[in-house]
């Protein structure tokens, strides 16, 4: 027996425990000797087998791969947190510190300019929107100051929880000490049940808007009107709207969105009276387009688009205007005079804006004016009857009528990375140059109020593309393939092309 036989046998048995390996073939010539003095493997003269070397290399690489994967996961998590923390643009939350200060330390005079603001809104079947709207508008009221605000709300014909939610909001206004008029469950104004774009509908909408404005018509004494549709909007966005251009505006509007982009194309016109696009940067004339690209208020001919701020002067009688602290309207003869198509036109009589009759929501004069929304005729009359032409849209104030679209356009599209891609890489991909029209594009004509849509009623829905070039542009648009699919699906469900009456 070899004098070291016992030790050799012991080493053979201990080798797998020390090295983690045992040759499957039973050949122990490549086994590593184990030195109990230093507890480390000792390479035998013959070296390892090829399979042992491959296995050792795998064992050596595994920790490196694990560390690399861990580093990747940590980096992705950190990037995700960073993207989540930076989803809001600085311009979008510019007024948040002032708003938070107002909420922490409320005071009756508020933190605004001290102007008297008349807040107006109409609602119908809006139980989904109202909890959000009332919460954010309560913040706005606190910022403006309870002594500087009057809230007027008019609701009719709802068959959901809208009246109850508005009643609760009225109680909250009472607790806040805010003057208000909240009318619910009203049926005094007959509601038409036919047509979605005809004078019956516009007449009804004009009547309910005038109803909610009645306290202002009667009382006077307000500097600005803040008129809101049934929208999702942030409190700081409303403040940004009122603070646009340091208050140097006659009318200022948000931008409203739905699934295809900019929504109320029936009302909005660019600075030259031209139709707009649904796709950023919305306007086809260079001044407005440049302003939107820079994120600045863009001059327009008309707008409404969700929520609007207006000077109150035009809505008052001539006598009420005399009592205003800062009268705005000119007392010089109107130049140019009103066109014969305007309902206030009188032959051989030119009335200065300061003495003009009070402005009201109205319908277009059939056979003389372009058939228009009551919301379009307000900025039109601001310009033509009162010479108030400082009308702007604020491209950073974005609103929507559905929560999904609000999240998409208010936060996802405005995220700095997505915004950078849209503005520097995609840039509309060409078809932002396609105007939104209702009815055959060749029938669009120009009147005193700019471009006029040719239709009076659409069976399918109120706003649609009928520009023949749209389909070509969409098919050529690689970056908008999903948009094309969604649009086609929506139009298919709506039965497009619609019949025009």
Image (spheres, grey):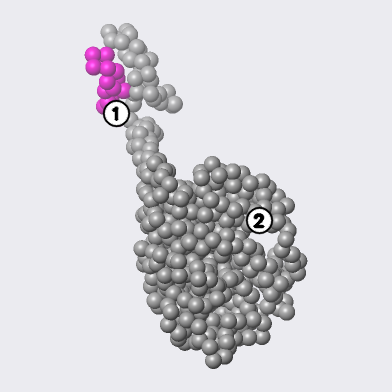
Give SS at disc 2: strand
Residue at horizontal 56 percent and vertical 59 percent from the top: 120
Q: Main secondary structure of the magenta part?
A: loop
Q: Is residue 126 above or below residue 289?
A: above
Horizontal side, residue 7 vs residue 148: left or right: left
Residue identified by numbered label 1: 46
Single out the residue that lies furthest toward the bottom. Answer: 348
- In terms of secondary structure, where does tag 1 sit? loop
When the figure is inspected, residue 494 is found, relative to residue 179, above or below; the finding is: below
In this view, the residue in front, 313 or 466, is 313
Chain part drawn in magenta: 32-47
Measured from the top left, where is residue 338 in percent x and y?
Answer: 53, 85
Give x and y (percent) for residue 407. Answer: 52, 53
Most foreground residue, 372 or 184 = 184
**Front-lying residue, 81 or 85:** 85
Is 490 inside the magenta-drawn segment?
no
At x 27%, y 26%, the residue is: 43
Q: Splitting the image into 4 quarters, where does residue 445 fall?
A: bottom right
> Residue beneath label 2, please?
155
The C terminus sits in image quarter = bottom right
Farthest-out residue, left: 37
Answer with the quarter of the image where residue 156 lies: bottom right
Could you tell me residue 141's position as x and y percent?
48, 50
């Amino acid at each position: 027996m070899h004098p070291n036989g016992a030790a050799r046998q012991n080493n053979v048995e201990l080798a797998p425990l020390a090295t983690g390996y045992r040759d499957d073939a039973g050949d122990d010539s490549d086994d590593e000797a184990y030195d109990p003095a230093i507890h480390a493997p000792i390479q035998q003269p013959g070296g390892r087998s090829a399979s042992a070397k491959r296995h050792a290399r795998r064992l050596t690489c595994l920790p490196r791969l694990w560390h690399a994967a861990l580093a990747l996961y940590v980096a992705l998590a950190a990037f995700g947190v960073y993207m989540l923390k930076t989803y809001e643009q600085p311009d979008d939350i510019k007024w948040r510190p002032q708003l938070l200060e107002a909420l922490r330390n409320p005071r009756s005079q508020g933190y605004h300019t001290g102007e008297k603001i008349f807040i107006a809104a109409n609602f119908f079947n809006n139980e989904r929107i109202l909890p959000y709207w009332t919460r954010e508008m309560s913040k706005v009221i606190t910022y403006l100051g309870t002594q500087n605000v009057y809230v007027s709300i008019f609701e009719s014909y709802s068959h959901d929880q809208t009246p109850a939610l508005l009643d609760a909001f009225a109680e909250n206004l009472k607790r806040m000490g805010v003057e208000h008029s909240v009318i619910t469950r009203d049926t005094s104004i007959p509601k038409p049940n036919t047509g979605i774009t005809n004078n019956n509908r516009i007449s009804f909408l004009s009547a309910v808007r005038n109803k909610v404005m009645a306290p202002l018509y009667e009382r006077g004494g307000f500097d600005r009107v803040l008129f809101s549709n049934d929208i999702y909007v942030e409190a700081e966005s409303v403040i940004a709207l009122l603070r646009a251009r340091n208050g140097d505006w006659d009318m200022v509007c948000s931008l409203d969105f739905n699934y295809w982009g900019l929504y109320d194309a029936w009302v909005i016109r660019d600075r030259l009276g031209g139709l707009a696009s649904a796709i950023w940067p919305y306007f086809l004339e260079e001044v407005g387009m440049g302003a939107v690209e820079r994120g600045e208020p863009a001059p327009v001919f008309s707008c409404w688009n969700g929520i609007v701020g207006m000077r109150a002067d035009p809505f008052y009688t001539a006598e009420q205007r005399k009592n205003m602290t800062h009268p705005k309207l000119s007392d010089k003869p109107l130049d140019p005079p009103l066109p014969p198509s305007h309902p206030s036109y009188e032959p051989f009589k030119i009335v200065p804006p300061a003495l003009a009759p009070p402005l009201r929501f109205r319908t277009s004069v059939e056979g003389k004016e372009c058939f228009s929304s009551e919301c379009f005729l307000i900025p039109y009359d601001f310009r033509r009857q009162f010479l108030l032409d400082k009308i702007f849209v604020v491209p950073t104030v974005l609103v929507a009528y559905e929560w999904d679209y609000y999240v998409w356009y208010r936060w996802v599209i405005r995220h700095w990375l997505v915004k950078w891609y849209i503005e520097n890489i995609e840039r509309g991909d060409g078809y932002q140059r396609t105007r939104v029209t209702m009815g055959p594009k060749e029938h669009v004509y120009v009147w005193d109020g700019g471009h006029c849509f040719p239709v009076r009623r659409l069976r399918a829905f109120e706003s649609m593309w009928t520009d023949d070039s749209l389909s070509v542009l969409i098919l050529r648009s690689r970056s908008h393939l999903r948009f094309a699919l969604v649009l086609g699906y929506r139009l298919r469900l709506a039965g497009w092309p619609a019949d025009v009456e």
